[in-house]
Amino acid sequence: MSSPFTPEHVAEWVSFGPKLKGKPTPEQQVAAQERKTKCMEMKVRLVEELNDPNWTLKKVEKELDRLVAEGASAANEIPRPAYLDPPSGTRDFYPEEMRVQNWLFDKFRESARVFGFQEYDAPVLEHVQLYERKAGEEIVDQMYNFVDKEGDHVTLRPEMTPTLARMVLNKTNLQTGEVRVPLPLKWFSIPQCWRFETTQRGRKREHYQWNMDIVGVDHVHAELELLAAASYFFKSLGIGPDVVGIKVNSRAVLEAVLAKHGVKKGQKNEADGGDLFASACVIIDKLDKIGGCAVTEQLATIGVSSESSAEILKALEAPTIEELAILIGDECEAVEEVKRLFQLADEYGIGDYLVFDASVVRGLAYYTGVVWEAFDRSGELRAIMGGGRYDRLLELYGGEKCQVPCVGFGFGDCVIMELLKDHGKLPKFTGSGVDYVVCAFSPDLYGQAANISLKLRMTGASVDLMPTPKKKVAASFKHADQAGARRMVFVAPDEIAKGVVRIKDLRTKDKNGDAIQVDCPLDALDTVDDLVATAVGDA
């Protein structure tokens, strides 16, 4: 894992001066005491900021000293060419980062599995036409698109939902709109997505996104199931409703609000011929970022008066769906739908996560009904997850007969990782490396070591066979410790002559605190667990 400390932290640590060596003079003793006081104050501060029991005062000091030494070493290196860094906004995943990523993805997959979703995937390269929608969506300008060597206009996918629509349409009769596979479909994927946008905390130009979609259900039971899956995922990470909430609204409710002020769905924008309602949604989606005054100015560009904008903004501030219903005035089916969703969420046991927020509209033009965003209640991070109903997207791509109801969400990996770091919820993977490290005493015994490794692997164990024999046991143990191994196998001539091999269990101790070790017959390597258990009982 990367260090939690910044170059500014390291510079502050260095400013306290170096540690004194040898017998100090009286003046040096005074300076050393001042340094000790400053170092302690900084360590205490950092431990409080990290809010992680694994980061003790001693560990913080050790890490800062390491970074200082690393910086001094780097200062003596030749300049590193820029091409050795990953492109701006992208990430390298070293093995330690991959272990955390795989853990997170396993949580995604497990949450999808217990809710009965099936995994799918598709090429990272897609047709540009899938994303060239109107209504001024930022995503169109953020694509990594180009013309390939066959003259096709393609792009690295910026999101997965259009790909899902394309795949469902390939199982659909475009003439009749009949989907040839049994509905509903409950699909999920964890694609890598690409957008050329400004990088910031929780936002990269490439990211992985857990997508969950239900196809073929035209009522809020589908939204409920997806919100329940997201809530289940949060709970599996130890993230409760006190840390995260999910803001819920409906595009259809917003449609009723805007219609009262002359902005109707399907109405053309006189300026560019686009959909006026969709354009208004894109503007309103920026409310948290640019504020009410800027939203009013932008709504004016599509013909919405300042008086109407004021009424719209007032409606968006309604604290409950009931109060918004009063402002709308007329009976609204969409309002009843949202009320029903909250009622069902309470019965499902996920109501604590849900919050009504009339200002949530989501920026993508294809949303048609209930929409939502997950947020951290401290307000430190951008949206954690977002989704909603998009009943007309398949029709857009496949024709008017393809009116297939859909609803889904996208859950990026970047923001949730920041949240987990902030709350100390990331696993440490202590001792979660390979099961065995096998080391030969000499080159003559390497064949024996390889055979022992093979037999251990046949029992289902993971085995790291050290490529270079080591006569010094300490060197072997160092390698095993770096690998996070559970057990160490040292293939030495005396034991081999007796038809056994010595195995030390690095995670199991006897009453004296020493690691348990056993001599296991070469023809009974599948009994190691039993031998260790017996040794523990005898210890």
Image (cartoon, helix red, strand yellow):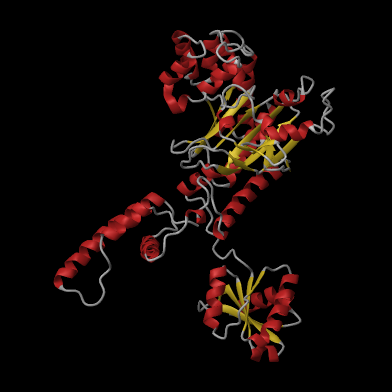
**Residue 520 appears in the picture as rendered:** no
> Which x, y percent locates residue 443?
64, 85
| Residue nearest the observer in this picture, 400 or 180 | 400
Q: Where is residue 173 in the image (x, y as percent from the top left)?
A: 84, 27
Residue 232 at least partly seen: yes
> Measured along the vertical axis of the image, is residue 302 above or below residue 36?
above
336 or 38: which is nearer to us?
A: 38
Instruction: Judge left or right: residue 25 versus residue 295.
Output: left
Instruction: Locate residue 404: give its quadrant.
Output: top right
* Residue 289 on image: x %, y %: 45, 28
The answer to whether 409 appears left or right of 77 in the picture is: right
**Rendering quarter of residue 369:** top right
Question: Could you tell me which residue is drawn at 54 percent across and 38 percent down?
Answer: 196
Q: Is residue 452 above or below residue 156?
A: below
Viewer-closest of 307 and 73: 73
- Residue closest to the far left: 26
- Residue at 55% x, 11% y: name it: 328
Quadrant containing the C terminus in the rendered view: bottom right
Residue nearer the viewer, 85 or 209: 85
Q: In this view, does 494 lie to the left or right of 242?
A: right
**Residue 156 figure quarter:** top right
